[in-house]
Amino acid sequence: MKLRIDKMLSNIGLGSRKQIKQDAKKGFIKINDEIIKDSSKIIDTEVDEIKYKNETVKYVQYIYLMMNKPQGVVSATEDNYDKTVIDLLEDNDKFYEPFPVGRLDKDTEGLLLITNNGKLAHDLLSPRKHVNKKYYVEVAEEVIEEDVKAFAKGVTLEDGYNTLPAKLEIIESGYPSKCYVTIKEGKYHQIKRMFKGIDNEVVYLKRISMGPLNLDETLKLGQYRHLTKEEIHKL
């Protein structure tokens, strides 16, 4: 990307355009090891090496974060009553004004993608894209093969909506039963409502994947990390 050096440095939080201009005159900015005192100089972020106060800096337009969302935290950028997933971020990541891609219920744990890339978020959430979302679920009553067939056909919710076919995999039958559920849409409280539609109740819910992105199980609840280049490339 080509842009002015003062815009680049201010965009990544190193100061106001006015401050960057003053620092340039003091010789604090180097482009390819050459001191540049003109803060309006155009640079190529993919080619040029930029140093600010002798520290190499990189231009970052988008950030991609994977969080293992804990219970009790809402998937929002701000909330008047509850802590949000954005509150769990470090200040240097908050600077880029990221937002959660979709929502996990307040009492649901697991994979949450947080980014400032609006186009990517739209693509992942678009009903027309049919992006798979896989959950680990524990339900109060026993899950049987008839339930698997019911999910495969699509479940009628209490408001009359017929869900798209979903994949229900039984891990362990009993009380509670443990299973995986994969859905292609994201209706409000969908998995809870689907189980309610077959006279069962979700007691624990955790998202483990979204599209090609799998939850990093080394992340403790409330922890997050930046996606790797390979993970970003798959999105």
Image (cartoon, rainbow, N blue to C red):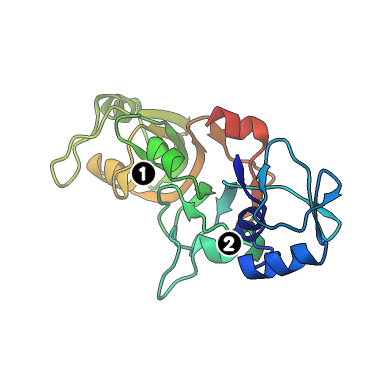
Q: Which of 182 and 64 is in front in this view?
A: 64
Q: How far apart are marks 2 and 1 (CA)?
A: 42 Å
Q: Can residue 200 be seen in this view?
A: no
Query: Is the residue marked by circle 1 packed among few (<14), some (14-19), or many (20+) residues within 10 Å?
Result: some
Residue 94: percent from the left, percent from the top?
Answer: 58, 61
Q: Which residue lies furthest to the bottom in this view?
A: 81
Residue 101: percent from the left, percent from the top?
Answer: 44, 47
| Contact flag, marks 2 and 1 (Cβ < 8 Å) | no
| 86 sits to left or right of 60 | left
SS under mark 2: helix
Q: Earlier in the sequence, mark 2 or mark 1?
A: 2
Query: Is the residue marked by circle 2 packed among few (<14), some (14-19), or many (20+) residues within 10 Å?
Result: some
The disc labelled 2 sits on which kind of residue? Answer: Lys
| 11 sits to left or right of 22 | left
The answer to which quarter of the image holds residue 160 is: top left
- Residue 136 position (above or below residue 79): above
Q: Nearer the viewer, mark 2 or mark 1?
A: 2
Q: Nearer the viewer, residue 18 or 83?
A: 18
The disc labelled 1 sits on which kind of residue? Answer: Glu
**Residue drawn at (45%, 71%) of the image:** 82
Residue tagged 1? 141
| 218 sits to left or right of 65 | right
Residue 194: percent from the left, percent from the top?
Answer: 28, 41
**Residue drawn at (45%, 39%) of the image:** 120
Residue tagged 2? 94
SS under mark 1: loop
